[in-house]
Image: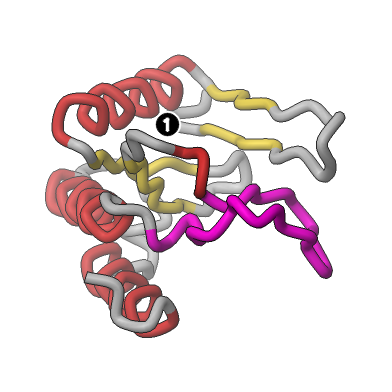
């Protein structure tokens, strides 16, 4: 039986199909993160792939997506329109969403009991995801 498993399939080109597939708990956790982002601007969740690898999901609300760069899976040399000036990591709520994702991982790490999870078997979610936030911020040129 799976718990909190969610997979995303990103389109590889404009006419491809994107998909989200997950178990009930994973989809509910995604919904909760989206609801928080809609209400407060940023949400986050800890989810898992079917191989047991955990990942943090950052959900950011951007009121005007018209200038945000399109993101296709496997892009090698993207062609951007002149209006696509803002990288996804530079949207207003992105840093807050990374923080919410780190909090979700920390909360999960603090409440885990019983069965082994990727967090208990070696991944320190709080430290790992705070490092991810710092790394993303430094790679983003210090986005505040």
Colour basis: secondary structure
Q: Quadrant of the C terminus?
A: bottom left
Badge 1 marks a residue whose secondary structure is loop
Query: Quick one: 122 or 125, which is closer to the camera?
Result: 125
Q: What residue appears at the point 62 percent right and 47 percent down from the top-left corner?
A: 51
Q: Which residue is mark 1?
A: 4
| Residue 117 shows in this picture | yes
Looking at the rendering, the stretch of residues picked out in magenta corresponds to: 68-90
Q: Is 92 left or right of 2, judged from the image as shown?
A: left
Using the rendered view, name the quadrant where residue 34 is placed. Answer: top left
Q: Main secondary structure of the magenta part?
A: loop
Mark 1 neighbour density, 10 Å: few (under 14) some (14–19) many (20 or more): many
Picture coordinates of residue 13, whole percent (x, y) = 84, 42
Residue 116 among those drawn in magenta: no
Residue at (18, 53) in percent of width and height: 103
Please tell me which residue is depicted at 62% across the width and 36% down the height of the picture: 8
- Which residue sits furthest top? 24
């Amino acid at each position: 039986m799976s718990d909190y498993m969610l997979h995303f399939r990103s389109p590889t080109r404009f006419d491809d199909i994107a998909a989200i597939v997950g178990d009930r708990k994973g989809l509910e956790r995604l919904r909760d993160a989206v609801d928080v982002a809609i209400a407060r601007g940023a949400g986050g969740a800890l989810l898992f792939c079917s191989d047991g690898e955990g990942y943090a999901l950052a959900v950011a609300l951007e009121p005007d997506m018209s200038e945000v760069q399109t993101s296709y899976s496997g892009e090698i040399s993207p062609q951007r329109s002149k209006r696509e000036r803002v990288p996804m990591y530079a949207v207003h709520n992105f840093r807050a969403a990374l923080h919410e994702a780190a909090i979700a991982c920390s909360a999960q790490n603090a409440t885990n009991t019983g069965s082994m999870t990727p967090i208990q078997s070696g991944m320190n979610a709080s430290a790992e995801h705070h490092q991810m936030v710092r790394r993303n911020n430094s790679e983003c040129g210090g986005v505040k």
